[in-house]
């Protein structure tokens, strides 16, 4: 009898483990499938929107024809050539350029070709955003501009996030105080976008006071020493980073303060206060611990949002980042650059969403990966 009991218990444990593993695998497979479908739909929608449903092809063909006519006219200006020969040369050059850009095939076929290339990160070459030696690979453009964006956005957004959470936790202790009312009063100031504050900062600190540069990343020519270069970079970064922080500071502080107030009014918090626990222990165990999933979600989404940059703000400050590059790509109808940045952001977002399910289960015992009651 004693030998059978452990055997049954072991079998029960193994059966429970097998069921848990199967449930987890079903959950992971379903999540991966749904994320893949979402990415495919999002990227194809981006391709269609970036090409205006194929209308960009007409714009590109007109640009090619116009530039080719001007080029042929310049080539044959001092040469005795008939009109028919000139037109034939123009048509041949136009056909070659359209073939190089893939405009010799229907757009619907090329759209699926773009989709396959995008999903495999075969981003191709930029169409109009070219270097001195011709077209440039989209991957090279992204990797060249990404460090500047990560430096600016990372500094501003990480400072904003941690400062807002820390100060909001302090404000939640003093509900109804002068500082609490001040934050509520100033929260509507975040309705203005960062570039709006950036223009005012440029007028005040660059044009009037002349203590900070108008824009750019470093001076021209840049300082030769490492320390001088770093200080010059920091000086150029003050205005764009400040505009990003000021634009979202009070609304972020107000949101986190309200969020912590909701949890600090729970019954278990009142019970902890009655037990005589210190404010720091109450915040750590009974306020921060239940809110960790939300804090982690916001932080994870903030990290991947650094990729896109601040499009208009970077343009206003002439910051050579990825946001300004996307802005120029939209103006040039440069579909490969637009799709390239979108697909990488989509992959980062999908990976983050997939991993967050498991992070939730680690930080919050109430969350069960894959659902179920076991």
Image (cartoon, rainbow, N blue to C red):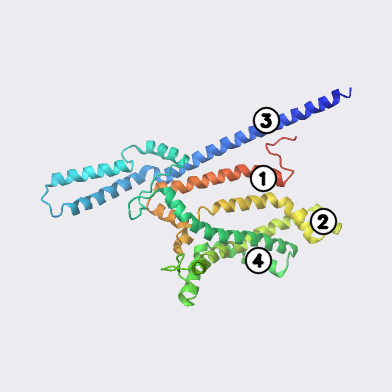
Residue 295 position (above or below residue 177): above
C-alpha separation, residue under disc 2 versus residue under disc 4:
26 Å
Quarter of the image that includes the N terminus? top right
Residue count near mark 4 (Cα–Cα under 10 Å), binned few <14, some 14–19, many ≥20: some
Q: Which residue is mark 4?
A: 183
Q: Secondary structure at mark 3?
A: helix
Quarter of the image that includes the C terminus? top right
Q: Nearer the viewer, residue 155 or 32?
A: 155
- Residue 123 as seen in the image, left or right of residue 285: left
Residue count near mark 2 (Cα–Cα under 10 Å), binned few <14, some 14–19, many ≥20: few
Q: Secondary structure at mark 4?
A: helix
- Residue 315 as seen in the image, left or right of residue 28: left
For this orientation, the residue located farthest to the bottom is 209
Q: Which residue is mark 1?
A: 359
The answer to whether the residue labelled 1 contacts the one labelled 2, judged by CB atoms less than 8 Å apart, is: no
C-alpha separation, residue under disc 1 versus residue under disc 4:
32 Å
Return the disc, 1 or 3, that comes first in the chain's sequence. Answer: 3
Q: Which residue is mark 3?
A: 22
Q: Disc 1 vs disc 4: which is toward the camera?
A: 1
Residue 248, by quadrant, is bottom right
Q: Secondary structure at mark 2?
A: helix
The answer to whether the residue labelled 2 contacts the one labelled 4, judged by CB atoms less than 8 Å apart, is: no
Q: Which residue is mark 2?
A: 270
- Residue 339: horizontal and vertical position, in percent? 44, 46
């Amino acid at each position: 009898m004693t030998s059978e009991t452990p055997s049954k218990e072991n079998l029960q444990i193994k059966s429970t483990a097998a069921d848990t593993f199967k449930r987890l695998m079903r959950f992971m497979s379903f999540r991966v499938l749904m994320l893949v479908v979402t990415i495919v739909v999002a990227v194809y929608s981006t391709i269609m929107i970036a090409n205006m449903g194929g209308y960009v092809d007409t714009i590109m063909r007109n640009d090619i024809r116009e530039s080719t006519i001007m080029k042929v006219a310049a080539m044959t200006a001092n040469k005795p050539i008939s009109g028919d020969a000139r037109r034939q040369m123009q048509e041949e050059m136009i056909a070659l350029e359209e073939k190089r850009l893939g405009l010799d095939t229907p757009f619907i076929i090329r759209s699926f070709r773009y989709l396959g290339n995008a999903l495999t990160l075969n981003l191709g070459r930029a169409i109009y955003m070219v270097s001195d030696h011709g077209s440039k690979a989209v991957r090279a453009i992204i990797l060249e501009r990404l460090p500047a964006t990560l430096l600016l956005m990372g500094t501003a957004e990480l400072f904003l996030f941690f400062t807002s959470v820390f100060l909001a936790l302090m404000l939640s202790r003093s509900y109804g105080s002068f500082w609490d009312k001040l934050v509520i009063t100033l929260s509507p100031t975040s309705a203005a976008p960062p570039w709006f504050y950036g223009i005012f900062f440029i007028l005040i600190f660059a044009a009037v006071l002349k203590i900070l540069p108008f824009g750019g990343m470093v001076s021209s020519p840049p300082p030769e020493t490492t320390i001088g270069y770093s200080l010059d970079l920091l000086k150029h970064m003050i205005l764009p980073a400040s505009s990003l922080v000021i634009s979202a500071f009070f609304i972020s502080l107000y949101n986190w303060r309200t969020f912590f107030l909701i949890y600090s009014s729970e019954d278990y918090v009142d019970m902890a206060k009655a037990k005589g626990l210190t404010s720091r222990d109450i915040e750590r165990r009974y306020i921060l611990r239940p809110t960790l999933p939300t804090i982690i979600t916001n932080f994870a989404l903030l990290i991947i949002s650094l990729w896109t940059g601040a499009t208009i703000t970077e343009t206003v400050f002439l910051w050579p980042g990825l946001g300004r590059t996307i802005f120029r790509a939209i103006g040039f109808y440069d579909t490969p650059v637009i799709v390239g940045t979108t697909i990488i952001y989509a992959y980062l977002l999908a990976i983050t969403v997939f991993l967050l399910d498991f992070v939730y289960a680690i930080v919050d015992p109430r969350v069960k990966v894959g659902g179920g009651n076991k």
